[in-house]
Amino acid sequence: MGEKTIKVRVPGTTANCGPGFDTLGAACTIYNDLSLTLLAEPGVHIDIQGEGAGNIPLDSRNIVWRSIQHLLRRLNLTDTYPGAHIVMENHVPLSRGLGSSAAAIVAGLKAANVLTGNRFSRREILQMATDIEGHPDNVAPAIFGGFTISSMNNGRPECFSFMPKIPLQLVVAVPEFPLSTRAARSVLPKMVPMKDAVFNVSRTALLVASLCRGNKGFLRHAFDDALHQPYRSKLIPDMYDVFKAARDAGALGVSMSGAGPCLIAFTVEKAVPVGEAMVAAFAKREISAKYLLLDIAERGVHIIH
């Protein structure tokens, strides 16, 4: 049997989008490419270029390889393909809140699925990716693209994807320091006040309705959150000052991107002034940062050749 190689492209993602904790997400126009060759001989050979080179494991701990093995086990093909050659070309920043782990998981599952005959649907890939990641808010937009709403029903993820009727630009401020999802989750309380839960339910509903109807007038308060950002703000110095700077510069709304430390502003104009204002606000605390200008990516993971 001749060896076949597949190359896939997967978008980075932002999750939560303010009030939609572990529920809302969006695919972003920043991408990782993955080339995969499944081998009949044992051993995994991994080459990483770009973001994460020198920090991502090159052995069996690698999350791409673990995701590939997860799919192969479902097909009883681990003995058929005990090895692989993996090339990762990464542009999504690592541990910054732009879905780098979700991108790795989804890319590995997609590439392995194609090489083994496309036996799993996108919904089945979503289930596997959620099982690996632990929640669907990043893996869903990485698979389906667009803006996604995800929920869990008895351990099974469900996802609805759409493109907003508002042409949102995403201005992502990327500070120089990383923040692991585990650390960001560790500061969250086990219980929250009823008023905070109601606050978030109302904002989440308002956000989704505004994006579906194309009404940007409600967005200024629709990205507000009471469930996770107030607790995580202690991990990101002067986070709310950066929020204010973005709003003052013209952003419709602003939130943490995923678990942070990236902060993301949503706008339809003045994207450059918003990005410059966010970077300047970080600089006041002597924190170096850059900004990225992104759009919502309509396509999720896909084959490029």
Image (spheres, rainbow, N blue to C red):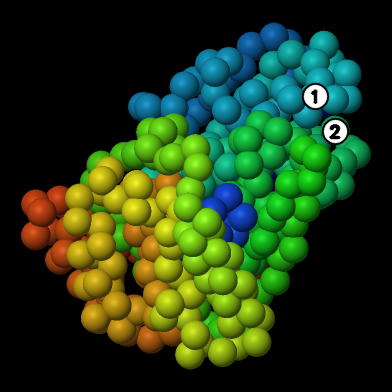
- Disc 2 is placed on an element classified as loop
Q: Position of residue 178 (x, y in %)?
A: 31, 40
Q: Is residue 8 visible?
A: yes
Apparent side of residue 145 relative to residue 173 in the rendered image (left or right): right
Image coordinates for residue 42, horizontal then vertical, percent: 69, 9
The amino acid on which the numbered mark 1 sits, given as a three-letter code, is Leu
268 relative position to 27: left or right? left
Quadrant occupied by the N terminus: top right
Residue 122: x %, y % from top left: 81, 49
Give the mark, 2 or 1, whose residue is nearer the N terminus.
1
> Are the residues at dot 2 and dot 1 in contact (C-beta closer than 8 Å)?
yes
The 10 Å Cα crowd at callout 1, few under 14, some 14 to 19, many 20 or more, is many
Q: Is residue 300 visible?
A: no
**Few, some or many residues within 10 Å of mark 2 (<14, 14–19, 20+):** some
Numbered circle sitting on residue 48: none
Q: Is residue 199 left or right of residue 75?
A: left
Going 58% across and 15% down the picture, which residue do you hit? 60
Could you say which is closer to the camera, residue 288 or residue 149? 149
| Gap in angstroms between the C-alphas marked 2 and 1 | 8 Å
Numbered circles on residues, count: 2
- The residue carrying mark 1 is 72
Q: Secondary structure at mark 1?
A: helix
Q: Residue at x 71, y 52 (%)?
A: 151
Of the pair 241 and 3, the residue shown nearer to us: 241
Residue linked to disc 2: 116
Identity of the residue furthest to the front in this view: 194
**In the displayed structure, would residue 272 be above or below residue 2?**
below
